[in-house]
Amino acid sequence: MNLQTCIPLSTQKPSIDYNSEILMLGSCFAEHINKKLEYFKFKTLSNPFGILFHPKAIETFLWMASQDERYTDADIFFHNERWHCFDAHSSISDPDEDVMIARLNEGLQKAKQQILKSTHIFITLGTAWVYRLKSLDMIVANCHKIPQAAFDKKLLSVEEIADNLQNCVQLIQSLNTSVQITFTVSPVRHSKDGFIENTRSKSHLITAVHQSIEKNAKLSYFPSYELMMDELRDYRFYSMDMLHPNDLAIQYIWDRFCKIWISERATKTMKKVEEVQKGLTHKPFNPHSEQYASFLEKLLIKQKQLQQEYPFMIFLK
C-alpha cells in the first residue's frame, strides 16, 4: 500500500559542488535552504537586503545591484526610532542613518560581486500580493509597520509577474551569461492575506514561473511548494503557527534538494563536514579527560584535511 504521493524529480545539471558559487534570493524559505548550505560550508550568499517576498522587490534589488546604483539619504526614512528603506527588509534597518545607507550600498556591492561569479542562483517567490505606497506611487518590498492606510494592496497578474521574472533574468544575464537560474515558490502560507487569497497568489506565481521556464533553457524549477503540499500534507510538518514548515519539513525538502542538485563527490564531502560540525558542538562529560583530548586531536585532523582541500572553509566552535 502506497501511503504517500511522490513527486518525480530529475537530477539537475550543472550540479552543485564545492567549487560552485551560489546566490539565494527571495522569501524566508530561501533563508532556510541557505542555512543548510552554510552549515555544509558551501560558498553561498543569501538576501543582502533581507527577505524579499514578491517578484517586483527582487527585480528592483537586481536592477540596483546590476546597474551600480547607490542609495542616499533621500532613499531612506525614519520611523519608530529606526531608519528604513522601502526596497529592503526591516532586518536591514538601523537607528543610525549612516549605518543604514552603508548597509544598503554594501549589500548591492556584495550582490553584484556574487552574481558575476555565481554558478547557481535560486530565487524563491513568496507572494504575488504587493503594497503600493500612495504618496510615491511605488510598490514597496516592505511596509515597515507604516499604517496600512498609506498603501493600496494589489495582486500582481500573471503577466506582470512574468515580466518581473524576465527582467530579473535579463539583469542577471547582463552580468553572467553562464549562470543557472532556478525558481521556486515558497511553501509558507500567507494567511494574513486570506486563505483563498493565498491560493490565488501562489497560483499566479507558479503559472508565471512556468511560462518563463518554457521560454528559456537556462531556467529551471524546484518544487518546494509542491513537496510541502503533496508529499507532506500533514500538520505534523508545520510549526506551531500551522503556516510555516517545521524543522522536519525543511530537512525533508533539503534532502530532496540535495538529491537532484548536489554532486556525488560533494555529497561525500558533506558527510565529512558534518562530522566536524557535530564534533565542534559535542559537550563532554569530562572536558579534562584523555579521551576528550584524543577526540579533539582527531577532530582537528579532520578539519585540517578539509581545509587543505577547501581553504575557504572556516569552522567556528
Image (spheres, rainbow, N blue to C red):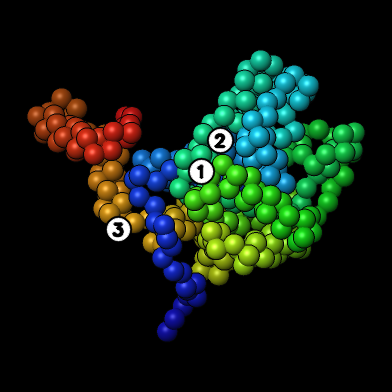
Give the labeled residue for mark 3: 264
- The image position of residue 317, as x and y in percent, is 32, 29
Nearer-the-camera pick, 174 or 250? 174
Lateral position of residue 135 relative to residue 315, left or right: right
Quadrant hosting residue 73: top right
- Disc marking residue 111: 2
Nearer-the-camera pick, 222 or 142? 222
- The image position of residue 240, as x and y in percent, is 58, 51
Give the labeled residue for mark 1: 23
- Disc marking residue 125: none
Quadrant hosting residue 139: top right
Amino acid under disc 3: Glu
- In percent of the image, x 27 and y 54: which residue is there? 265
- In percent of the image, x 53 and y 45: which residue is there? 176
Crowd band around label 1 with a 10 angstrom C-alpha radius: few (<14), some (14–19), many (20+): many
Amino acid under disc 2: Ala
- Gap in angstroms between the C-alphas marked 3 and 2: 28 Å
Mark 1 in CB contact with mark 2 (< 8 angstroms): yes
User: In the rendered view of the protein, which quadrant contains the N terminus?
Assistant: bottom left
- The image position of residue 247, as x and y in percent, is 47, 51
**Secondary structure found at label 3:** helix
Q: Is residue 58 above or below residue 146?
A: below
Amino acid under disc 1: Leu
- In percent of the image, x 71 and y 35: which residue is there? 87
